[in-house]
Amino acid sequence: MISEHDSPYDLFNSWFGDASESEPSDPNAVAVATVSDDGKPSVRMVLLKSVDEQGFVFYTNLGSRKAGHIQANSNIAMCFHWKSLKRQVRIEGAVQPVTDEEADEYFGSRPKMSQIGAWASKQSQKLEGRLELERRIAEYTAKFNIGTVPRPEFWSGFRLVPEMFEFWQDQTFRLHDRLIYERSGDGWTTHRLFP
């Protein structure tokens, strides 16, 4: 049975620590679901880059489909699934942009070719062929060959501020354990769900 903690962040950090030791690749991979302005849902995998009591941070091209959805509707959902542990965590809430300082700091920590890739990619836009992408990579590699690569204005991050967490643990006979945390003022209320 899932042990309750005072804060869902404490439980998440405990589970994330377990996943970091057991998952063979990208324990920080998370599905992010958004909804377009005409009500059509979309989901994709992103990499969680930081988490603290303020929320869950990921980065993207601001011209991407997900960023467009977020601008139309800031309510999103995340789902971590750690197969080796037979656990998942669902999180729902609204997102807000990270500060320029946060985005600059994270962008500066990326490998140089990842920084150049951010400049070269017109994320979610139609690509005529791989050669077009390779040409853009060569162009920006030449442009930023010497010195630091500045963060593009069209690249930044979002922070999901949770209103709800669901912690799910596999159990025998599909009698899974499900623990909910819901924001209540400055704290959290908890309850369990039938499997």
Image (spheres, grey):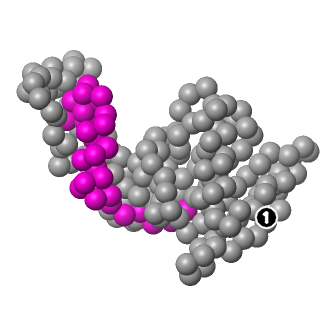
| Residue at image point 66% right, 48% down | 14
| Residue at image point 37% right, 50% down | 66
Camera-side residue: 67 or 17? 17
Q: Is residue 66 above or below residue 95?
A: above
Position of residue 101 in the picture relative to residue 185 (left or right):
left
Furthest toward the bottom, the residue is 185
Q: Is residue 184 above or below residue 34?
A: below
Amino acid, disc 1:
Leu
Residue picked out by circle 1: 193
| Quadrant of image for the C terminus | bottom right
| Residue at image point 75% right, 40% down | 86
Position of residue 85 in the picture relative to residue 161 (left or right):
right
The spot of residue 132 in percent (x, y) is 19, 23
Camera-side residue: 3 or 132? 3
Q: Secondary structure at mark 1?
A: loop
Whether residue 68 is visible = no
From which residue to which does the magenta span run? 92-119
